[in-house]
Image (cartoon, helix red, strand yellow):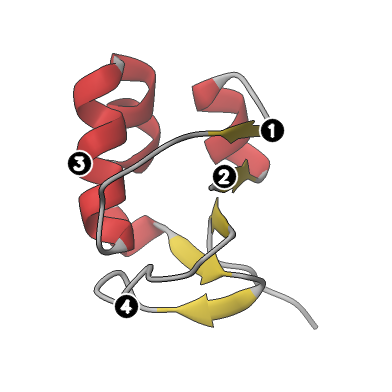
Amino acid sequence: MELVYFAWVRERIGRARESIETQAATPLQLIEELSARDERYGAALSDVSALRVAIDQELADFDTKLTGAREVAFFPPMTGG
């Protein structure tokens, strides 16, 4: 699975993307798995209320199933005008 990080999430983790093997069934489980691996992930991903997630480039909830997903992206909420 390809993971992509944007904005301050990328800055806190220290990389823009990475490929991983995971057993996580949802983005929330993926965050738990990543946070257990390295404290940088915990610092960047611990507050899901300050994050958005996209699965294969479509906005999703943190309890959406990852079955068949090729890409998961984490990013802060966007504002625009």
Distance, label 4 to label 3, CA atoms, is 15 Å
Tags 3 and 1 in contact by the CB under 8 Å rule? Answer: no
Residue under circle 4?
A: 64
Instruction: Rate crowding at label 3 as few (under 14), some (14 to 19) or many (20 or more) other CA atoms within 10 Å.
Output: some
Q: First in sequence: mark 2 or mark 3?
A: 2
x and y percent of residue 9 in the render? 53, 38
The reply to whether callout 2 and callout 3 are in contact (CB within 8 Å) is no
Front residue of 27 and 41: 27
Residue denoted by label 2: 3
What's the distance in space between the residues labelled 4 and 2, CA to CA? 16 Å
Gap in Å between the C-alphas at discs 1 and 4?
23 Å
Name the amino acid type tagged 3.
Glu
Instruction: Looking at the image, tell me whether mark 1 or mark 2 is earlier in sequence order.
Output: 2
Q: Tell me the tag on residue 32.
A: 3
**Amino acid type of disc 2?**
Leu
Amino acid at dot 1? Ala
- Which residue is pictured at 47% across the width and 70% down the height? 68
- Residue at (26, 47) in percent of width and height: 23
Q: Nearer the viewer, mark 1 or mark 2?
A: 2
Q: What quarter of the picture does the C terminus occupy?
A: bottom right
Dot 1 or dot 4: first in sequence order is: 1
Q: Can you give x and y, in whole percent of width and height, for residue 3 in the image?
A: 57, 44
